[in-house]
Image (cartoon, helix red, strand yellow):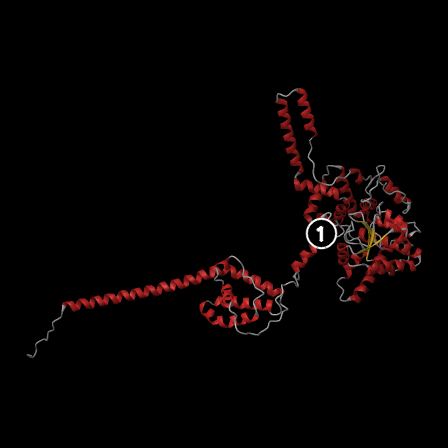
Amino acid sequence: MPCGRRQSYNVNPSNKKDNSFKLFITFLLAVLLVYLVIYALIVILTKQRNYGKENEKPIIKSSATIFSLLYQKDNLNISEESTEASNDKEQLYTTTTGNNEDSTEEPIELESATTENEISTLSTNKQTSTAEENPILIAIESTYLAATKLLTSTTDKAITEEICQRPDCKKMAIDLLKNINFSIDPCEDFYQFSCGNEAKSSNSEDFDVLFEEIENPKDDGVRSFGRFFNSCLDYTKQFDTIKQILSINVRSSNMTTLLGFLLLRQSTPLFEIVEGSNGEIQILPPNSYDTDILENWSLKTHIDKHCLTSRNLDDYKQCQSKTLNKMLKNLHSFKNNEKPMGDDFVLNIIKQQIPTINIQEALFKKSCQQVDIPQLNKNYPIIDWQILLSTISETQNSICIYFKSDYFDPIMSDLKSKNESEVLNSIKDYFQLQLYQNLIFQRNSEFCMNQAVALMPEIAEKIFQKYVFNNERFEKMFEEVKAKFNWLIEVSKLKEDDKSLLQNKLKLLKIEYNTKKFAPEDYHDANDDYLTKLFMLLEVKRMIHKEKKTILFKKIDLVNDTIIASFTKQLPGQIFI
């Protein structure tokens, strides 16, 4: 080869073409690979996002269920044993992770049949793979496993303990119990049984309706309602009320007559007598919650308000004695420093009173002892039971004593062992103290309105009915329909006699409302004396179950001439029940 001559190579055109094609294919594969990677990432992210959305609701539901169960079962012991998994652990895991389509609609149900061995093995085998897939699943699975252990670590029986232990549940239970009237047979009148005491409670909205109505009364009943409320609220006459209370001289040397007088005024300290829905006479411990017309009327209620914060039982008993002595001192300060009665009688009665919850249970179960009047007169001769029971009802088909051995026998035995005149004086002083404590220190608008509603429920119901059902609007519409129908009769081609017949029948059509009927004269009052009206209304309500018509306040020889005169003045002749 000569020096300096450039060496040359022969290049085949086909080889050059092949190299270009290979480069192009490599580029396409690289682009496709990048596309696949991006697509895979998008799919993974989308699945994770969708997974969170799909399982968000079941997780919340399941967590709520689990934590509520954990709250109720926080006293159970968690066992840490673990053995081999059962054959259906995969099905349990599927239910737990929420991959089932139904899991988005229904909360996860905890099956009590799942054993602890299945749970512990499931936790061991699935935790690693779950962590790689989604860390949220670990929290779900762990919570589920812990809750299931709590529910199944002891036995497989259903959850029946501690059903209502939370404060909100207890409050609702208390509200329901307040509405129940256990003296009513649910088989005879279930509504009155379940809601019979609901009418006793009132709220501020109810008061607003009543206040608005009594400011502009339109009938005698509402006027009487308003006058009673205003007389109760009149603070300027409180000293007059105190004088009336202290001037009540119950001139009776007979236990039967005295108890009959107090029984009609919801002030008997020894026992309560009421007539049940089936006509049965019930003898109960005093101040039974469902027999009181006026709530919070007993001395024990007022004493408890001062003493329930006592640290222990001894402090509570000391507080009872001190509070009662203070009440007596305040009352007798108006008696020109007369020597007050001892507190042993009142305290002994208060200490022997039966708790309300026990009375409710006894009335519901009808746990009483059937007796008749001859048996009562023989066992407790200090009282003429025929006369006493006729105060409430003139029919004594059957008589039932509640808490006979726990309360009634001890209290009657104690009375028999004491001097009768001393007992009578103590009972009279008890009555005066109860009136003084209730009528002087509580006379605010709420107290007075509650009294008016309790003593005149028919009038209050009429007022509420007017606002709730808008009766005036209904009556106006009804009169308009009658007027149009009357016009149709006039323009019709009927004979004149037929027209007159139809028009007369049309005039007789009236709207009837399903409300209690009352006679306005039952609440007639010629004066504004609060104490007089209070006694009258109490007596009316206490004798409401008498079948025969009885003259109100007949043969009353118990109070002084002033009180009898005030009673007689306000009667429009004779009031019949």
Residue furthest left as drawn: 2
Above or below 219: residue 431? below
**How packed is label 1: few (under 14 Cα within 10 Å), some, or many (20 or more)?**
some
In depth, the one of 393 and 87 nearer the eye is 87
Dot 1 amino acid type: Asn
Q: Does residue 360 appear to the left or right of 2 in the view shown? A: right
Residue 208 visible in the picture? yes
Residue 549 left/right relative to 98: right
Residue pointed to by mark 1: 179
**Of residues 115 and 30, the one drawn nearer to the viewer in this rendering:** 115
Residue 467 coordinates in the image, percent (x, y):
67, 41
The image quarter in which residue 413 lies: bottom right
> In the rendered image, which quarter contains the C terminus?
top right
Task: Give the left or right position of residue 282, taking residue 493 as reference.
Answer: right
**Location of residue 457 by image quarter:** top right
Report whether residue 201 is seen: no
Q: Secondary structure at mark 1?
A: helix
Q: Of residues 184 and 437, which is closer to you in this image? A: 184
In the current view of this chain or complex, which residue is farthest to the front? 87
Q: Position of residue 226 (x, y in %)?
A: 75, 42
- Name the spot of residue 154 as percent of width and height, x first: 62, 69
